[in-house]
Image (cartoon, rainbow, N blue to C red):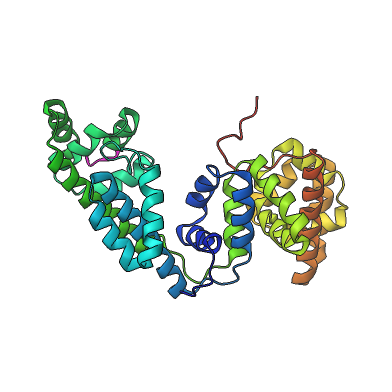
Amino acid sequence: MRQNITGKQKAAMLLISIGPEKSAEILRHLKEEEVEEITKAVAGIKKLKNTYQEKVIEEFYNLSLAQEYITEGGINYAKEILDKAFGGSKAEIILKKMTASMRSNGPFDFVKSMDPSKIAQLIKDEHPQTIALILYNIKYQQAATVMTMLPKEKQTDVARRVAMMEKPAYDVVKQVEEILQKKISYDYMNDEMNTNISGVETLTEILRSVDRGTEQYIMDYLKKENSTLEEEIRKKLFTYEDIVKLDDKSIQRVLKDIDNNVLALAIKASQKNIQDLLFKNLSNRVAEMIKEEIEIMGPVRVKDVEAAQDAIVMKIRDLEKTGEVVINRGGEDEVFV
């Protein structure tokens, strides 16, 4: 990896590598100025080369591994890892920072933030005693969800072993933790590592996953810094196919400003679910008029259809800015009363 790559650029590469959902979760825990800088770095990466991707993941892994050894008291081994990865002087600085911020962790802390379905997938083929040990050490609700996802033939055996379990030996817990961490690392490297991904594409997906306030904050920042980039991302954020994310009231508001000829062109090449949704939100009279127009329209050029659909998308974006329409982005805070 080039020596002049900054820490922010490395962080951006890591976010691109781990995918939008995990990246969005990380951004939620950062300060506003950190979000600004890393967002800018992500958007600035046109294509992430595999070699850079592997290097930044390796560097992150070495830092994580060193932190683990520090936590367990293996300071010397942690220093050895950091020396090999970064060189003596930098390793010393990193080690000091790590030990200063170190805090003790409970068993299987790295699992407690994982989705239960992911945990179940990772451990379903393990010995029932191993599964029981993991469930014994994670959150009750998390364990309950994992239990329901296990094969039926294992559920009762695992439940019995959990009930009979006393405080497990430290070395046994550490051994199972190591096995599980290796499985997670292997699964991540094989299933979740993106290749040759555009920073703009990644940032778009991240913004689709964050809450509306964070999205707006980042977009406002990008508009000030690079209006061309902001417009490119805004176009990707909402597409014609995303019209299904609008509620009926919002769709009716949008259609109010769309010419019937434009609407007929847009609907003609739409997927059936979108056609049904749009017709449902038109008056019977207007819907029949548009259906008749589509029937007599004959073949149309693709670029004309796309222009009509783009006109609808632009209207949706304009109305969202004024708060007249609501786009349901699927986040946890998308609750209406």
User: In this rendering, does residue 292 appear at all?
Assistant: no
Image: magenta residue range:
149-153
Tell me: residue 68, above or below residue 61: above
Q: Quadrant of residue 110?
A: top left
> Residue at coordinates 73% horizontally, 58% vertically from top-left?
230
Q: 189 or 45: nearer the eye?
A: 45
- Residue 135 visible? The answer is yes
- Residue 185: name its quadrant: bottom left
Q: Residue at horizontal 26%, vertical 35%? A: 147
Image x and y of residue 307, in percent: 80, 64
Looking at the magenta stretch, what is its main secondary structure?
Answer: helix
Seen in the picture, residue 57 relative to 208 is either above or below; the reply is below
Residue 118 coordinates in the image, percent (x, y): 34, 46
Name the side, left or right, on which 187 lies relative to 158.
right
Residue 259 lies in the magenta stretch: no
| Residue 42 to residue 4: above or below | above
- Compared to residue 168, the image places residue 221 above or below, namely below
16 sits left or right of 312 in the view: left
151 is within the stretch colored magenta: yes
Tell me which residue sits at (16%, 32%) in the image: 156
> Who is closer to the viewer here, 204 or 244?
204
